[in-house]
Amino acid sequence: MTISTGERTKLLIDCDPGHDDAVAILVGHRHFDLLAITTTHGNSSLENTTRNALAVLELAGIADVQAAKGAASPLVGATHHAQHVHGKSGLDGHDLPLPSLQPVPDHAIDVIIETARAHQGELILAVIGPATNIALALRKEPRLAGWVKEVTVMGGSGGGGNMTAAAEFNAYCDPEALAAVMTAGWPLRMVGVDVTRTVGIDAANIEILRASGKRTAGVIADLLSFYMSRQTERTGLTHAPMHDACALIPLLDPDAMTYRETRVDVELTGTYTRGMTVCDFRGSPVKNPNARVAVVPNQQRLVGVMMDTVLSYP
Ligand code: BDR
Ligand code: CA
């Protein structure tokens, strides 16, 4: 593994924890200079995702990362949650204690804008839930697109969805917001569910986490057991897919993922295809490219980093 050392990349994670978000937060804190976490509706209500984000920080003993609450609903249309995958709390499988950490009083939109303003040209924005907060931040401060070094999105798909036949969950939950993010003109990479569903922590690895005797790894093992069984029931997957961490690790380990530069547009109107990310893979020259889209994951490297990371916490 060639995770770079030296000065750590500045990172803000916009998320909706969520089991895979929880692992992504641990990866973000361990390997990046994680400046802030902002929360959104998505896997569960905003109240739940915010509580879960704080509970994960507290579990791992992370006290130096501010968390800010964001949007409770999408720009347009109904709000959707993924109780069928992540349970009633959004993080079922272990009764985490109510966190004593509190979110900062500022809205997520302002935290995103101010963090990017303070670290112009240095900040990576990881968008691993519905993109509502980022779209609202762009609307409030259009210069944001020029301040951010790169955006990395877990969302959409290079082919086939998980929420509908065509649409991935994060994209489906707020297609208008994702469209704004995709067309903002900033450097952007996207990893879709067609790729991330193939990268996961399986029963053998869950046992390794449990047997480690570490508190954090033990709780993550319980959480992932629940999440994996939901995945198995619904989709036949025999691992707990780690969608969100796949948006982070390739920033540190270029050999973890192969990307293709392409044009991605988000379908906003289709009766059967709303929320679909239409990726133009027809070949070169690519017309009006706006993203590097993940096409081939290195599962072993990605899962290796996730496992080492979880095991590195007390
Ligand atoms: C995405 O949807 C959520 O359920 C996961 O946390 C991930 O961000 C996968 O489609
Ligand atoms: Ca997520």
Image: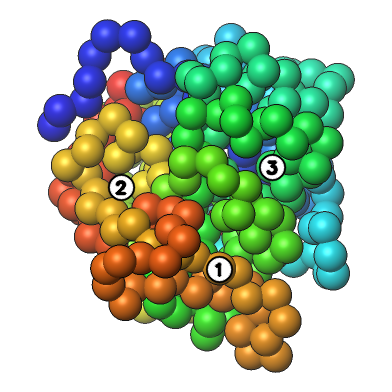
Q: Is residue 160 above or below residue 16?
A: below
- SS class, disc 3: helix
Q: For mark 2, does the 10 Å Cα neighbourhood hold few (<14), some (14 to 19), or many (20 or more) residues?
A: many
In the picture, the quarter occupied by the C terminus is top left
Pick whichever of labels 3 and 2 is earlier in the sequence: 3
Q: On the image, numbered disc 1 is attached to which residue?
A: 265
State how many labels appear.
Answer: 3
Q: For mark 3, does the 10 Å Cα neighbourhood hold few (<14), some (14 to 19), or many (20 or more) residues?
A: many
Q: Is residue 133 above or below residue 38?
A: below
Q: Is residue 53 above or below residue 204?
A: above
* Residue at 62% in and 47% down: 184
Q: Horizontal and vertical percent for residue 173?
A: 69, 64
Q: Horizontal and vertical percent for residue 276?
A: 56, 75
Q: On the image, numbered disc 2 is attached to which residue?
A: 206
Mark 1: which amino acid?
A: Asp
Side of 89 relative to 203 (left or right) = right
In the rendered image, which quarter is residue 23 located in?
A: top left
> Quick one: 168 or 232, which is closer to the camera?
168
Q: On the image, numbered disc 3 is attached to which residue?
A: 134
* Residue at 70% in and 30% down: 143
* Residue at 27% in and 68% down: 284
Residue 197 seen in the current view: no
Observer-side mark, 3 or 2, equals: 3
Side of 174 relative to 170 (left or right) = right
Pick whichever of labels 1 and 3 is earlier in the sequence: 3
Mark 2: which amino acid?
A: Ile
Mark 3: which amino acid?
A: Ile
